[in-house]
């Protein structure tokens, strides 16, 4: 990784953040980078758990899994860790962030004994977490969820199906969002539950193969009986908890995008300095210089938006300001990273198309970021909505 002056050149970080960034960068280069070539190889489940073990040993999961004592996550630290991990291995970044996404609602509203049990296991890497919200007919429209949870004595019976669930088949427990009623406008009243992977009636119906390495699939709930004490928050709190989770982690998606974009740019600069065409290096050609200049400028702009949003979150800015800042960061950074990765492949020419080449992997890995946790189109709607409120 090239020297990163961004932290010392911008006002968003404390000395502790600077030390964290340097430490994670060193850890990722030393421990994660040698494993990155295995991200798409056979035995991916074992590789996933090996990465989880590495992150737990380095105590990095404490930056994605909230403590549950009311102390908020450090958003800047979350973003710094994601950026460094994504630079070396997008899969390691996924392993890291899913432990947080799958547990954040629990940290906010689960009963104390349920909360402490699962948070401790997630933070130590002993259990894999998942966040089960998306359904075949409920993607961006969360209120259209059809999976139901009916109260039956001292438990709830859950029926339904979820799709595109990260860690499906790997997770030991799922934070599941289900309909417990219907609002006056016909939309779902959502509640959240902790569902263990070994509960009767729960099964993984499909492991879905995506364009890039990403453990994901479909799960089904066929009369899964969940104790009422495993409900997270009150009935009807599900939508709020899901949105709080998204708002907390949304800017960090942009951080992951920045990590991938930084790697694509570094690979491009390295290639441009060594590859010769027409008697000179690519770096001597003005059209290549133009590409590198735009890539660097877009990366800087993306990082500024991401860490502005994270800084606002840590400073306790008003929710309306945070919502727009996080959406701007997620929208711009993921779109810019896609453009940077595309230009990186172009600069590499034929070698950039070879399966397994760094920029080829990044080209596939970066694409999902423009979709999950709210598509770019949804982010535009959120930004415009908040702007029009002012």
Image: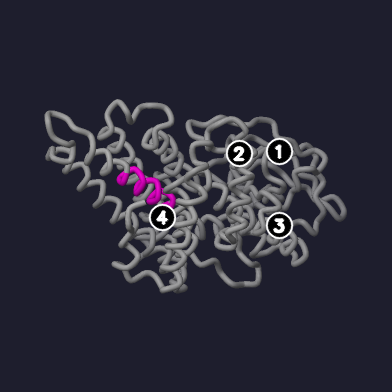
> Tag on residue 327?
4
N-term-proximal mark, 4 vs 3: 3
Circle 4: element type = helix
* Residue 135 position within the rendered picture, expressed as x and y whole percent measured from the top left: 60, 39
Residue 255 percent coordinates (x, y): 42, 54
Q: Which mark is residue 121?
A: 3
Q: Which residues are magenta?
A: 254-266
Residue in view at x 63 percent, y 52 percent? 102
Label number found at residue 98: none
Dot 3: element = helix
At x 73%, y 64%, the residue is: 116
Instruction: Answer with the quarter of the image where residue 223 lies.
Output: top right
Between marks 3 and 1, how big is the CA–CA gap?
27 Å
Q: Earlier in the sequence, mark 4 or mark 2?
A: 2
* Earlier sequence position, callout 3 versus callout 2: 3
Question: Left or right of 93: which side holds 225?
Answer: right
Say if the magenta span includes residue 258: yes
Residue carrying label 1: 160
Residue at (49, 34) in percent of width and height: 212
Q: Quadrant of the C terminus?
A: bottom left
Query: Which quadrant of the view contains residue 198?
Result: top right
The answer to whether the residues at label 4 and label 1 have Cβ atoms under 8 Å apart is: no
Q: Which residue is at the front of the view, 136 or 344?
A: 344
Element class at badge 2:
loop
- Looking at marks 3 and 1 on the same chain, the residue that comes earlier in the sequence is marked by 3
Instruction: Between label 3 and label 2, give the one nearer the viewer.
Output: 3
């Amino acid at each position: 990784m090239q020297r990163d002056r961004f932290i010392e050149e911008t006002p968003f970080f404390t000395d502790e953040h600077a030390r964290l960034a340097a430490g994670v960068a060193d850890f990722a280069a030393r421990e994660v980078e040698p494993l990155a070539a295995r991200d798409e190889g056979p035995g991916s489940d074992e590789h996933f758990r090996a990465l989880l073990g590495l992150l737990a040993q380095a105590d990095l999961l404490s930056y994605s899994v909230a403590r549950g004592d009311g102390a908020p996550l450090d958003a800047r630290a979350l973003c710094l860790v994601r950026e460094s991990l994504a630079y070396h291995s997008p899969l390691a970044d996924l392993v890291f962030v899913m432990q947080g996404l799958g547990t954040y609602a629990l940290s906010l509203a689960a009963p104390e004994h349920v909360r402490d049990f699962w948070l401790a296991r997630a933070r130590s890497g002993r259990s894999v977490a998942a966040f089960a919200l998306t359904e075949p007919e409920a993607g961006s429209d969360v209120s259209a969820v059809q999976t139901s949870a009916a109260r039956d004595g001292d438990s709830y019976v859950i029926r339904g199906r979820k799709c595109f669930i990260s860690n499906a088949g790997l997770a030991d427990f799922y934070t599941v969002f289900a309909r417990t009623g219907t609002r006056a406008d016909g939309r779902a009243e959502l509640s959240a539950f902790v569902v263990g992977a070994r509960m009767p009636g729960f099964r993984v119906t499909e492991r879905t193969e995506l364009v890039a390495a990403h453990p994901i699939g479909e799960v089904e709930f066929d009369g899964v009986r969940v104790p009422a004490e495993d409900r997270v928050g009150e009935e009807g709190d599900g939508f709020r908890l899901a949105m709080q989770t998204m708002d907390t982690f949304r800017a960090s998606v942009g951080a992951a995008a920045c990590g991938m974009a930084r790697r694509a740019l570094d690979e491009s600069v390295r290639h441009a300095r060594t590859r010769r065409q027409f008697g000179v290096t690519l770096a001597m050609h003005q059209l290549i210089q133009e590409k590198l200049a735009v890539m660097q400028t877009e990366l800087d702009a993306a990082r500024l938006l991401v860490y502005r949003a994270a800084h606002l979150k840590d400073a306790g800015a008003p929710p309306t300001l945070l919502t727009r800042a996080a959406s701007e960061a997620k929208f711009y950074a993921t779109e810019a990273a896609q453009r940077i990765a595309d230009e990186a492949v172009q600069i590499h020419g034929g070698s950039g198309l070879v399966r397994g080449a760094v920029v080829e992997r990044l080209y596939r890995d970066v694409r999902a970021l423009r979709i999950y946790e709210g598509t770019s189109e949804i982010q535009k709607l959120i930004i415009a909505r908040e702007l029009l409120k002012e």
